[in-house]
Amino acid sequence: MSVDTATPTGSAASVGDRYRLLECVAGDPDGPAAAWRAWDNLLNRPVTLTIVRPGGPAAGGFLGHAHAVSTVVHPALARVYDAVDEGDRAYVVSEWVSGTPLTALLNDGALDAESAAGTVARVADGVAAAHAAGVAFGGVHPDHVVVTADGGVKLAQVVGDGRARTGDDLRGLGALLYGALTAHWPLAATGGA
């Protein structure tokens, strides 16, 4: 049994009798799409839970993309653990990546050339592995790139609607390098041209 995510402020909601919603980190909790920092009660670990409404046929691209991404294993990409369609909503459970978003790092100014190139190269390696498996993200953006406490770099937002193309990712990687070198994002806020 699932509980709707619309709960009073300060109360905890659950999804699928397994995941406790902790904090909405992107989107509108009552809207068509939202990402949550959540807790997996079964495996006792933090996860990202991305919910779209409605589920069913309308969520086909979202769930198909999640299934495709789940086959790609790379240290620069957040892992996808589960994808569920409940009819009125669908959700994908993926790895919660702790660290500092690249956007926050760039608030302090541009990275030096070596750090910028190294950061983007790690993301590009993960994106290339996904492309080799036939998966494109379309969300290569500094908000979605996280630098972990141990210096690792991960693309934390890997779930999309399945409409992205490899060219979208290449444009995003180029913009990511430009942004890392200048501390300015050259594309629209959504990552598009």
Image: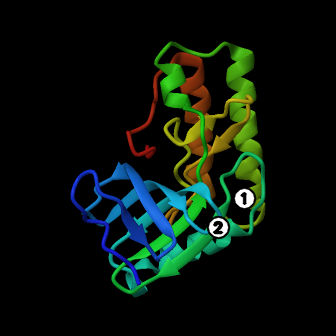
Residue type indicated by callout 1: Ala
Give how far across and how far down residue 123 sits, in percent: 69, 41
Is there a contact, CB below 8 Å, between mark 2 and mark 1? no
Q: Residues within 10 Å of mark 1 (few under 14, many from 20)?
A: many
Q: Residues within 10 Å of mark 2 (few under 14, many from 20)?
A: some
Give how far across and how far down residue 79 sits, in percent: 68, 58
| Left or right side of 99 for 17 | left
Q: Where 89 falls versus 51 (above or below)?
A: below
Residue at (51%, 13%) from the top-left corner? 109
Q: Where 112 falls versus 148 (above or below)?
A: above
Residue at (78%, 53%) from the top-left corner? 74
Q: Nearer the viewer, residue 153 or 148?
A: 148
Which residue position holds label 2? 81
Q: Nearer the viewer, residue 147 or 19?
A: 19
Q: Which mark is residue 130?
A: 1
Residue type indicated by callout 2: Tyr
Q: Quadrant of the C terminus?
A: top left
- Asked which secondary structure carries label 1, the reply is helix
Q: Where 178 falls versus 74 (above or below)?
A: above
